[in-house]
């Protein structure tokens, strides 16, 4: 059971691909994918956070927040 939980928490290439795909869609102006970006980005961040120091974790959350703000601002200008 512990091996199965460890396998679930590993970062899979699909996690990165889904996050990147959602980011590209939102960047292209398809704001309906913003929820996907936040969900996939959060999942990816949760999975890698076990290997991060607290400083790296804070900086990664801040980077995700800044990206989200820029995307929302850009979408509201259109």
Image (cartoon, rainbow, N blue to C red):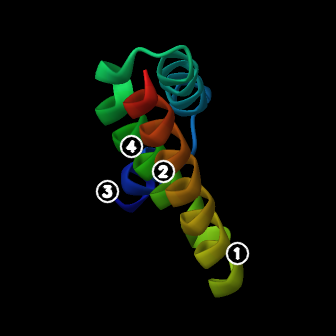
Mark identifier at residue 69: 2
Residue where numbered disc 1 is placed: 56
Q: Label 3, label 4: how many angstroms apart (C-alpha)?
A: 29 Å
Whether pointer 3 and pointer 4 mark residues with C-beta atoms closer than 8 Å, the reply is no
61 horizontally vs 43: left or right: right
Q: Quadrant of residue 59?
A: bottom right
Closest to the camera, between mark 3 and mark 1, is: 1
Q: State whether residue 32 is above or below residue 62.
A: above
Between 77 and 26, the one lying in front of the other is 77
Closest to the camera, between mark 1 and mark 2, is: 2
Residue 6 in view, yes or no: yes
Closest to the camera, between mark 3 and mark 2, is: 2
Q: Residue furthest bottom?
A: 54
Q: Residue shown at 50%/59% (left/top)?
A: 65
The first of marks 3 and 1 along the sequence is 3
The first of marks 1 and 2 along the sequence is 1
The first of marks 4 and 1 along the sequence is 4
Q: Label 4, label 1: how many angstroms apart (C-alpha)?
A: 19 Å
Q: Label 3, label 2: how many angstroms apart (C-alpha)?
A: 40 Å
Q: State whether residue 67 is above or below residue 52.
A: above
Between 55 and 71, the one lying in front of the other is 71
Residue where numbered disc 3 is placed: 1
Q: Label 2, label 4: how many angstroms apart (C-alpha)?
A: 11 Å
Whether pointer 2 and pointer 4 mark residues with C-beta atoms closer than 8 Å, the reply is no
Residue 7 in view, yes or no: no
Between 25 and 77, the one lying in front of the other is 77
Residue where numbered disc 4 is placed: 38
């Amino acid at each position: 059971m512990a091996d199965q939980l460890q396998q679930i928490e590993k970062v899979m290439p699909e996690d990165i691909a889904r996050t990147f795909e959602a980011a590209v869609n939102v960047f292209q102006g398809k704001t309906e994918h913003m929820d996907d970006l936040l969900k996939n980005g959060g999942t990816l961040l949760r999975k890698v956070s076990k290997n991060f120091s607290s400083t790296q974790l804070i900086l990664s959350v801040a980077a995700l927040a800044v990206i989200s703000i820029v995307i929302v601002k850009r979408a509201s200008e259109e």
